[in-house]
Image (cartoon, rainbow, N blue to C red):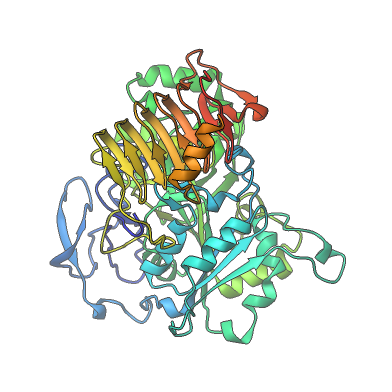
């Protein structure tokens, strides 16, 4: 579990000067669990004047008439107008400072990027994508509850630990106070966070950085950022925004079987409930340039952002189901453009999505980049829970396991998991666990977890523990009527998130049979969010408790 993931098969198309192609990445044909593959832009794909493509390595769905064309291109295919993107001239900024209120109580003692997911932490996703893309200049902005995040970064991504990494580095830029009135404020938003450290990007050692990739620390996806940067260069963009087609349903995955008429009816009466309203939405022209951008619109503003997404290559039915183009919150800026926007053009604007990007669309070349693989914003308890359990499915919609583009995390040096007469189905079991005559179904069991005899775990995300208790310590606690870390005998748990170091006693039932949607029982060691029971970190659930 320490480093694993699934390789994108990259699709690109080279065109002569004047022909602009809107393209992205293509992998197994999944797009955020949506069950279809997105072909690249239909227009000007193989028209007169396009460069010759030889059969070879890269697989690409170019149009619905040219369904499976194999394409590869030589390095000489790039003209002087479209130089090859050089990772040495690219730096990334990972925004990890948000309070993460929608992920509470998981963010009660940690920042969002430090939240565990599938045996990793969310910060490992953009970090691993950067490393696999060849980007070695990485800045991470931190602010709220950053202790565990800073510790994880120091343990995992220390490029200077006796081994030189060329001019690469990982630098944490923590929110701090500086002289002057403005310096007394914490980060006021994503753009303000970068602005407060603008002197870092103007420093002499960073003078060769031509492009800056802005990333979020709470998304789950695999992406080659250099393809993203290449599209940015090819279109001579000032800013490029990575985007995905988006549905107008609140929970798309669970409503796939509902007739489209009913979905439209729901949207008409309850537009504020649309899933699309959680994202920045855009309109584009035929060249892929963004002509309008609106951050998290509601009501009539939301409906006004509906577009015909068949321009992206979607079928008529797909375009009806996904009538919005949503920003992933992943951007690439020309360095000089970013500095100018933050210092001079919009010195009082604090957020990229709601202020900088919508304003820049009016007088800058802001391009869209279609990303056509799995992507999920881990912004709520529900999305976090669903994304974790989806990892256990066969085949998974997202897979950490891929030797070509591994995902990295802190080395734990733990022993293999020990399993004694257990039933395990569709589950992920992390290192260093002890499972004794228990049942685990459609669940994730985190590191150092202990499940005793008769335990039944179903549809559960168990994060594990930060440390072990010895057998003598466990026996002593049980003799005193106390509860050790782990799950005690004959306990039944379903539809639950168990945070780290939780102590759950014997004969406990956690099932939320009354289907309670929201509850706050911090004094009893749990919350209920969107119908999902969340057992708090370091909490104790006493023997015989029924939730």
Residue 307, percent from left and from top: 45, 38
Q: Nearer the viewer, residue 241 or 88?
A: 88
Q: Residue furthest left?
A: 55
Which quadrant of the figure has residue 180?
Answer: bottom right
Q: Nearer the viewer, residue 225 or 502?
A: 502
Residue 87, percent from left and from top: 42, 76
Q: Residue at x 47, y 49 (%)?
A: 468
Residue 228 visible: no
Q: Residue at x 37, y 31 (%)?
A: 320
Residue 5 visible: yes
Residue 342, percent from left and from top: 69, 66
Query: On the picture, is 308 further left or further right than 397?
Result: right
Count of residue discs: 0
Residue 153, percent from left and from top: 53, 64
Q: Nearer the viewer, residue 228 or 49?
A: 228
Q: Residue furthest top?
A: 514
Query: Where is the N terminus found, in terms of image quarters?
Result: bottom left
Query: On the picture, is 444 further left or further right than 512?
Result: left
Residue 436, placed above or below residue 237: above
Q: Nearer the viewer, residue 206 or 53?
A: 206
Q: Residue at x 65, y 76 (%)?
A: 200
């Amino acid at each position: 579990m320490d480093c694993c993931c699934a390789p994108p098969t990259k699709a690109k198309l080279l065109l002569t000067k004047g022909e602009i192609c809107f393209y992205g990445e293509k992998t197994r044909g999944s797009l955020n669990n949506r069950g279809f593959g997105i072909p690249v832009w239909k227009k000007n794909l193989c028209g007169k004047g396009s460069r010759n493509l030889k059969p070879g390595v890269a697989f690409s769905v170019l149009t619905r008439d040219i369904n499976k064309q194999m394409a590869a291109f030589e390095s000489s295919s790039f003209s002087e107008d479209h130089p090859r993107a050089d990772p040495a001239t690219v730096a990334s900024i990972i925004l990890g400072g948000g309070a993460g209120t929608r992920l509470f109580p998981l963010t009660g003692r940690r920042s969002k990027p430090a939240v565990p997911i599938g045996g990793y932490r969310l910060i490992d996703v953009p970090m691993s994508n950067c490393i696999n893309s060849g980007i070695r200049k990485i800045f991470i902005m931190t602010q709220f509850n950053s202790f565990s995040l800073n510790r994880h970064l120091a343990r995992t991504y220390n490029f200077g630990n006796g081994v030189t990494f060329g001019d690469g580095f990982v630098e944490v830029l923590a929110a701090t106070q500086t002289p002057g009135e403005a310096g007394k404020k914490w980060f006021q938003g994503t753009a303000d966070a970068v602005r407060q450290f603008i002197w870092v990007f103007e420093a002499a050692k960073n003078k060769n950085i031509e492009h800056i990739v802005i990333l979020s620390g709470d998304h789950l996806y695999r992406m080659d950022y250099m393809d993203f940067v290449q599209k940015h260069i090819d279109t001579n963009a000032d800013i490029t925004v990575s985007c995905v087609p988006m549905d107008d349903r609140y929970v798309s995955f669970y409503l796939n079987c509902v007739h489209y008429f009913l979905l439209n009816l729901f949207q008409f009466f309850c537009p504020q409930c649309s899933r699309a309203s959680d994202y920045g939405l855009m309109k584009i022209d035929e060249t892929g340039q963004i002509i309008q951008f609106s951050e998290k619109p509601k009501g009539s503003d939301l409906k006004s952002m509906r577009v015909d997404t068949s321009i992206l290559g979607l079928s008529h039915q797909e375009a009806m189901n996904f009538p919005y183009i949503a920003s992933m919150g992943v951007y690439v800026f020309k360095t000089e453009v970013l500095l100018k926007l933050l210092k001079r053009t919009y010195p009082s604007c604090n957020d990229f999505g709601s202020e900088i990007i919508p304003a820049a669309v009016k007088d800058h070349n802001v391009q869209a980049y279609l990303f056509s693989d799995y992507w999920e914003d881990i912004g709520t308890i529900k999305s976090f829970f669903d994304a974790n359990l989806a990892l256990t499915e066969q085949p998974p919609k997202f897979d950490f396991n891929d030797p070509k583009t591994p995902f990295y995390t802190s080395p734990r040096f733990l022993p293999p998991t020990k399993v004694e007469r257990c039933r395990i189905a569709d589950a992920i079991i992390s290192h260093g666990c002890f499972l004794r005559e228990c049942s685990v179904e459609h669940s994730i069991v985190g590191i150092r977890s202990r499940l005793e005899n008769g335990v039944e775990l179903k549809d559960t995300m168990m994060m594990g523990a930060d440390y072990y208790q010895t057998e003598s310590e466990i026996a002593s606690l049980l003799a005193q009527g106390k509860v050790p870390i782990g799950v005690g005998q004959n306990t039944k748990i379903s539809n639950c998130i168990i945070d780290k170091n939780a102590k759950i006693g014997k004969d406990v039932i956690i099932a939320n049979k009354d289907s309670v949607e929201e509850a706050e029982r911090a004094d009893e060691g749990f919350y209920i969010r969107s119908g999902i029971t969340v057992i708090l970190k370091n909490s104790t659930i006493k023997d015989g408790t029924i939730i």
